[in-house]
Image (spheres, rainbow, N blue to C red):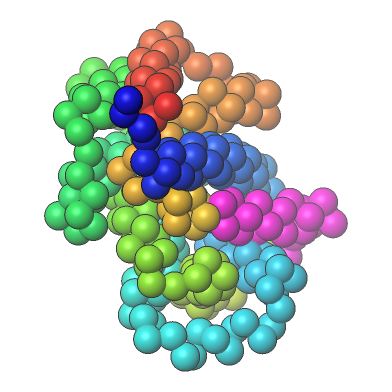
C-alpha cells in the first residue's frame, strides 16, 4: 500500500494555513481601501497626507508589537538592499492605489489588482523557481477574463486613473515576489519592521508641504486605523508567504471582491453593474477552483 510522506502532509497543511492568512489579509486591505477613499473624497485631506499617516500608523503598530529594540536589528541585517526594494515597492503600490481610489469605484480598483497573479505567475518561475502547473495557469487566465468584463476595457469609457491601478497591480505583484524571496532569508518580525520605512520617509516631505489639519477626532481615528489595519494585513501577508509559494497565494486576492463590492455599496452607494457581477462570478469561480486544487 502506498503511504503519503509526512513532508507532503505538512506542506499541504502549511498551504491551507497560508491561504487562510491570505484571505484575511485581502479583506483587511479592502477595509483599508474603503477608509482611504472616504478620507480622500469626504474630508478634503490630500492623498499624500493620507498615505504618510497610513505608514506612520503602521510603524506605531510595529513598535507596539515588537518594541523599539527591534528597530536596531535593521542595521545588522546583511540583506538591507532587498528590504529597501521591498519597502519601496510597498510605498509605490500604496501611492498608486490611493490615487486611483480618489477617482474610481472600489470594485474597479480592486479588479485591476487582479492582474497581479498573472504577473506573479509569469515571474515567479524565473525569479523564485516556483513554477505553476498548466491547470492553475488556465484558472488564472479565466480570472483575468472576469477582470476584463468588470473594467470593460475595449468598450470605451475607461478612466485615466486606471493607469494608477495598473501601476499598483504591477508593483504589488513585485512586492509579493520580493516578500516570498526575503521570507527565506529573514524572520517575519524584521520584514514587518522594514516594510513601511520607505513610504514613511518618501511621503513625509509631500505630506508636510500639503498638510491640512484633520477637522475632527474621528478623522484622526480613521487615519490611525488605516495604519493599524494595513500593518496587520501585511503582517499576515508575510506569514502566509513563509508557508506557501507566491504563485499559489497570488490568485486569492480575488477573495476580496465580494466584500469590497459590498463596502462600496454601503459606504458610497456605488452599486455594481451587470458587467461587475458577471466578472465577479468568473473570478470567484476561478479562485474556488484554485482552492479545490490545493485541497
Residue at horizontal 45 percent and vertical 51 percent from the top? 243
The foreground one among 69 and 197 is 69
Image side of residue 180 versus residue 240, left or right: left
- The answer to whether residue 160 is visible is no
Residue at horizontal 50 percent and vertical 84 percent from the top? 74
Image quarter where the N terminus lies is: top left
Image side of residue 263 versus residue 214, left or right: left
The foreground one among 50 and 110 is 110
Q: Position of residue 110 (x, y in %)?
A: 44, 35
Q: Position of residue 185 (x, y in %)?
A: 38, 72
Q: Is residue 7 above or below residue 206?
A: above
The span shown in magenta is 213-236
The foreground one among 204 and 146 is 146
- Magenta span dominant secondary structure: helix
Q: Is residue 33 above or below residue 140?
A: below
Residue 223 sits inside the magenta stretch: yes
> Of all residues shown, which one is farthest toward the front?
1
Q: How many marks?
A: 0
Image quarter where the C terminus lies is: top left
Q: Position of residue 22 (x, y in %)?
A: 50, 42
The image quadrant that residue 263 belongs to is top right
Residue 250 sits inside the magenta stretch: no
Q: Position of residue 7 (x, y in %)?
A: 39, 47
Amino acid at each position: 500500500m502506498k503511504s503519503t510522506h509526512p513532508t507532503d502532509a505538512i506542506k499541504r497543511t502549511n498551504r491551507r494555513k497560508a491561504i487562510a492568512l491570505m484571505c484575511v489579509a485581502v479583506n483587511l486591505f479592502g477595509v483599508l481601501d474603503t477608509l482611504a477613499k472616504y478620507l480622500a473624497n469626504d474630508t478634503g485631506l490630500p492623498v499624500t497626507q493620507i498615505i504618510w499617516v497610513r505608514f506612520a500608523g503602521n510603524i506605531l503598530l510595529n513598535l507596539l508589537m515588537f518594541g523599539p529594540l527591534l528597530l536596531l536589528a535593521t542595521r545588522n541585517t546583511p540583506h538591507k538592499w532587498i528590504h529597501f526594494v521591498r519597502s519601496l515597492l510597498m510605498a509605490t503600490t500604496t501611492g498608486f492605489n490611493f490615487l486611483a481610489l480618489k477617482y474610481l469605484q472600489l470594485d474597479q480598483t480592486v479588479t485591476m489588482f487582479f492582474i497581479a497573479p498573472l504577473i506573479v505567475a509569469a515571474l515567479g518561475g524565473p525569479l523564485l523557481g516556483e513554477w505553476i502547473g498548466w491547470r492553475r495557469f488556465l484558472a488564472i487566465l479565466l480570472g483575468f477574463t472576469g477582470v476584463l468584463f468588470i473594467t470593460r476595457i475595449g468598450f470605451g469609457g475607461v478612466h485615466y486613473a486606471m493607469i494608477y491601478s495598473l501601476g499598483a497591480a504591477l508593483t504589488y505583484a513585485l512586492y509579493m515576489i520580493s516578500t516570498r524571496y526575503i521570507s527565506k532569508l529573514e524572520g517575519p518580525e524584521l520584514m514587518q519592521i522594514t516594510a513601511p520605512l520607505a513610504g514613511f520617509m518618501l511621503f513625509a516631505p509631500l505630506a508636510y508641504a500639503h498638510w491640512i489639519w484633520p477637522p475632527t477626532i474621528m478623522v484622526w481615528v480613521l487615519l490611525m486605523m488605516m495604519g493599524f489595519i494595513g500593518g496587520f494585513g501585511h503582517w499576515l501577508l508575510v506569514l502566509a508567504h513563509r508557508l506557501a509559494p507566491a504563485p499559489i497565494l497570488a490568485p486569492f486576492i480575488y477573495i476580496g471582491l465580494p466584500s469590497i463590492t459590498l463596502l462600496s455599496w454601503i459606504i458610497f452607494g456605488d452599486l455594481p453593474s451587470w458587467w461587475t457581477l458577471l466578472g465577479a462570478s468568473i473570478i470567484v469561480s476561478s479562485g474556488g477552483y484554485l482552492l479545490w486544487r490545493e485541497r
